Image (cartoon, rainbow, N blue to C red):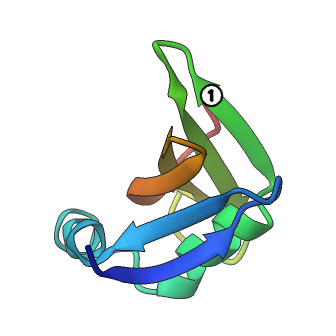
Amino acid sequence: MAFVFEVADKSGRKIHLSKKQWSHIRKKHPEVEELNWVKEAVQIPDKITSYEFDETIYYYYKFHKHRKFPAKYFKVSVKYLNGEGYVLTSYFGRNIK
């Protein structure tokens, strides 16, 4: 599988973004204009939360204060399998869940 990027998260675990998932993000969430937003949210997040129904999924949040729309929290959903993370999706939201 081809990766658009591979970075280490705040805890040092590897996270990949595949070409397929980047295509999904660009198609379903056109407000996500910069690939660097995804990298930055994973590498230096403002907050990390877990999904209560699946312990392998984590949400990485980065606040974008200069964004004009009400949705200012950039969220990256990551699933961890075998010690490595894979970006599922990313988009802007109004708050941290």
Identify the image quadrant of the N terminus: bottom left
The answer to whether any part of residue 67 appears in the image is no
| Position in image of residue 28 (x %, y %) | 19, 63
| Position in image of residue 71 (x %, y %) | 52, 55
User: 70 left or right of 50?
Assistant: left
The answer to whether any part of residue 72 appears in the image is yes
Q: Is residue 12 above or below residue 59?
A: below
Q: Is residue 7 above or below residue 89?
A: below
Residue under the point 64% across and 50% down? 60
| Position in image of residue 77 (x %, y %) | 48, 48
Numbered circles on residues, count: 1
**Extreme residue in the front direction:** 82
Residue under the point 78% across and 46% down? 47
Label 1 CA crowd tier, 10 Å (few <14, some 14–19, many 20+): some
User: 23 left or right of 67?
Assistant: left
For numbered disc 1, what is the local secondary structure?
Answer: strand
Q: Is residue 67 above or below residue 15?
A: below
Q: Nearer the viewer, residue 31 or 86?
A: 86
Q: Which residue is mark 1?
A: 50
| Position in image of residue 33 (x %, y %) | 40, 84
User: 56 left or right of 88?
Assistant: right
Q: Nearer the viewer, residue 39 or 5?
A: 5
Residue under the point 43% across and 59% down? 90
| Corner quadrant of residue 55 | top right
Identify the image quadrant of the C terminus: top right
| Corner quadrant of residue 32 | bottom left
**Extreme residue in the top direction:** 53
Given the image, on which type of amino acid does mark 1 rest?
A: Ser
